[in-house]
Image (tube, grey):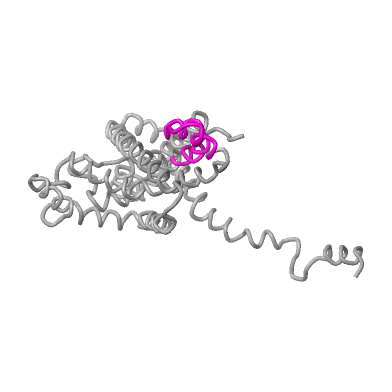
Amino acid sequence: MSDAATTAARRKPNRGYGRWTPALFLAPAVLTLLLIGIYPTLFALVTSFRRYNITRPREGFPFIGFENYANVLSDSTFWSSLFLTAKFYVTVLPIQVVLGLVIALLLHKPGMGLLKSLARVTLVVPLATTYAVVGLIGRLIFNRDFGVANQFAGFLGLGPIDWLSTPDGAFAAIAIMDVWQWTPFCALIFLAGLSMVPGEIEEAARLETSSKLALLRHVQLPYLLPGLTAVMILRSADVLKLFDMVFVMTRGGPGSATDLISIYIQRVGFRIFDLGTASAQAILLLILTIIISRLYIRLLYREVH
């Protein structure tokens, strides 16, 4: 067959492939995104401008403008929960980033192929565990009578600790479980960044200096910044919406010691049934997440040339 005939055969459209074929392949994903992402967000946005209490249907759902937002911004409990969430974030994130970076650097070192492969597999296990299951595991670990945490405390000569019954203990318990679940995520992201470092450049740098800190700062860090930016953005969003694990472990208690912002919004929306106020709180968190993400991108993200 001549070259012209071959080219003509390649250009001939396949049977069953028409103008709308790409749209048909994309349709399920687009519909799913609309149903579970776009529609709930639009519904929350509309609801946030209404007096929407489902226990008082006879009063209707009148439009009240920005009244819900004004009530939220003047709510001291909302700000206390938001401050507690920020405290939780600045507690767990540095630990996760440092431990993740150390694990990634260890796995990036040459040698020990089988052990590194097993380590990569085990890193996926916490990520594959759902938040509710992590909460159940946390309740078992920090149980006062038979928990593993108090077993280790006994080895150190410490008495049994009421982890989940004291404010500091409960806060430390949910922080430890969050670090356990998300440190592997940071490690895998950083490991992917380290794999992007050109081997000849890294080898030349190792010959020039024996300082691992200098190697990390001048050679590896530029390739880690995009991953670090992604970690900061994703973890910010995760902490702001963290609910399942904390609810299963502590229900937000004792008192308000672990009453993170998502726990408070759930209480307003599904215990008081004030969906208008809860929607306004959720929209404000969405705006806060977008602002934080833009700041991280502006301050941390750098293209590697």
Q: Residue at x 77, y 71 (%)?
A: 15
Q: Position of residue 227 (x, y in %)?
A: 49, 41
Splitting the image into 4 quarters, where does residue 176 fall?
Answer: top left
Q: Is residue 58 left or right of residue 80?
A: right
Foreground: 231 or 211? 211
Residue 65 sits above or below residue 12 on the image: above
Quarter of the N terminus within the rendering: bottom right
Foreground: 194 or 54? 194
Secondary structure, magenta segment, majority class: helix
Residue 8 visible somewhere in the drawing: yes
Q: Farthest residue toward the front?
A: 207
Foreground: 108 or 5? 108
Residue 50 visible somewhere in the drawing: no
Quarter of the C terminus within the rendering: top right
Residue 74 sits above or below residue 184 on the image: above
Q: Is residue 6 left or right of residue 266?
A: right
In the image, which residues are magenta? 203-231
Q: Position of residue 197 (x, y in %)?
A: 54, 41
Q: Position of residue 102 (x, y in %)?
A: 38, 42
Q: Residue at x 25, y 56 (%)?
A: 137
Task: Please say whether residue 225 is one of the residues in the magenta stretch.
Answer: yes
Q: Residue at x 29, y 41 (%)?
A: 260
